[in-house]
Image (cartoon, rainbow, N blue to C red):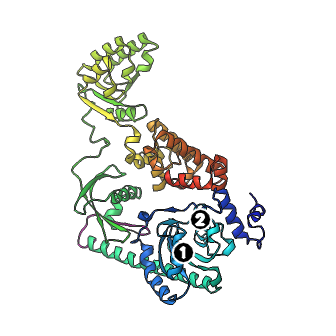
Amino acid sequence: MKPDDTMSLNSGRDPLRPEIALSWQRSRLSGLSPGTPNLRVDSDAVDRRSRLVAAAAPVLTKLAEQLADTPFCVLFADRESRIVGMPTGSRTLRDRLDRLGVVTGGVFLEETTGTNSIATAHELHRGVAVHGDEHYLEPFKAFSCYGHPITHPVTRRLEGVIDITCLEVHDSPLLGPLITRTARDIEDRLLAASRRGEQRLLAAFQVACGGHHRPVLVLGTEVTLANRAATELLDPLDHLRLRDLAAAGGSDAESHVVQLVSGQCVTVRVREIESGLDGTLFEFGSADRHPATPTADTISSEGLPGRPVYIGGAPGTGRTTLALLMLGGTEVVVLDAVDAAHQETTWLDSLERAACHGPTLLVENIHLLPEICAVRLRRVVDQPRLRVVLTGAPLAELAGQGALLAAACTTHRDLAALAERTEQLPRLIRVMLDQLGVGDRLRFTPATLAALAGHQWPGNLWELSAVVRSVASRRSAGDITPFDLPNRYQVSPRLRTMTPLERAEHDAILAALRACNGNKQRAAERLGISRTTLYNRLRALHLTA
């Protein structure tokens, strides 16, 4: 719909200003009717202890003193455009707004309440005034309102919207500068609080480090502090895992065992520095347990003569890589059961030659062996002078001769699917980048690793390797962001918990947004749904496109 079409809704009145006409257009395309608000109220979602509320409190108290006995009402909304409160206002006006659903917890977006100074300021990220008939919803046309966004001076993120509302007959051009100054005062306090918070983070860090050489790390929203021991111990990618650990909560006295990107296991004590302060302190110690993934040292005694090893797992989980690591740098004879199904006699001859000349043998996919080949291999496995490693399906899936062969092995290793060990993604990706010769030039950011961790990885390491090669072929240096990944991997970590229907819906919405270059209005039209419905589904599916 063109802005001229919107003008027809305002027939008989003065022409709408361009920014108001476009807001009406967005409201109409969202499916909102001028006579029927679609206001959502969720009072339980209001955070009255947020840093925004703390920063705004003294500013709004001063504003309330200035506006005492005036016919104005102040509304305060958070970054979701949800009303946090009405810190000041005449009782008559507050009661009238309350009857219209303007209450704490009400979500003021253009798709729920049309054109008004909270919803439109939130949409445009700039100050806006809406007078009388410029409101999209009929019940709001008796009012004038002035709104201004509150932006964090450090992060530049939208933190909320401050608004002043009155009946149209009480409108004053002085209200715009007043609410703009109020927003600036709140932003100044956010900046000051951020600096004080950084000082408290530094103080807590210095106390934790004092007189000790153990690794200490502090992670805040905008600040990272680490002593030399922590810098040498941790990779930046370890910070992603540590933030998840802090988000999970728990007792300050509790220690966790964490495997780092390097493969080393450490104990971590997580401590909230101060209630309400956005920062977490991590203190590290040595762990008794070994890394979950075998290293050359931990497997040197496996795969020795007379001690056959079975490695199970789905295709692509790294069975062959681990087998070759176990067998060391010696010359290895490799036989694949896939070949036995087509050339049984030739395969058996190769097995006999390997058994005679040895001493190192790797047989892959034993679950696919014909029975006669499996029986013959069983005799070879029993030979004490041979070093033998077998690979195949997970132990729980073996049957018949395959199960007997695995039972003959003195050591069993079952490799989990990649989707079950996504904490290893940073290290696996680093190894793959090193193998491609670009490990010192490319870096997968934490957000990218989080997106990859949400994938199901049916192809396991083969699939991951294909993704890494694809990215490396298009980027020669720098940070790899989620948008550098192939399209189907730019996903939310929540995908693993989605139902098949939710997953299909997620993929369809993401495809529409890409096709429309992120324009939600055009994406909704492409999907055949209202803009309101699209916003609702974006929130439900935790999509940030």
Instruction: Name the image quarter holding residue 70.
Output: bottom right
Nearest the viewer among 138 and 203 is 138
Instruction: Name the image quarter holding residue 271.
Output: bottom left
Residues at badges 2 and 1 in contact (C-beta under 8 Å)?
no
**Residue 146 x/y as whole percent:** 60, 78
**Residue 212 magenta-highlighted:** yes
Where 148 sits versus 115, above or below?
A: below
In the visual, does 227 lie left or right of 178?
A: left
Q: Residue at 40%, 48% (x, y): give it.
A: 427
Q: Secondary structure at mark 2?
A: helix
In the visual, does 478 lie left or right of 140?
A: left
Nearest the viewer among 405 and 156 is 156
Identity, as a three-letter code, of the amino acid under mark 2 = Thr
The residue beneath circle 2 is 113
* Distance CA(mark 2)–CA(mark 1): 16 Å
In the visual, does 521 lie left or right of 203?
A: right
Q: Residue at 23%, 72% (x, y): give it.
A: 211
Nearest the viewer among 426 and 477 is 426
Q: Which contiguous range is marked in magenta?
A: 209-225
The quadrant of the rendering that contains the N terminus is: bottom right
**Residue 200 x/y as whole percent:** 34, 76
The answer, for residue 112, to whether it is visible in the render is yes
**Residue 440 x/y as whole percent:** 48, 53
**Residue 164 x/y as whole percent:** 56, 79
Nearest the viewer among 221 and 65 is 65
Identity, as a three-letter code, of the amino acid under mark 1 = Arg
Question: Which numbered disc flags the more N-terminal residue, 2 or 1?
Answer: 1
Q: Which mark is residue 96?
A: 1
Where 53 sits versus 27, above or below?
A: below
The quadrant of the rendering that contains the C terminus is: bottom right
Q: What is the crowding at mark 1: few (fewer than 14 residues within 10 Å), some, or many (at least 20)? A: few
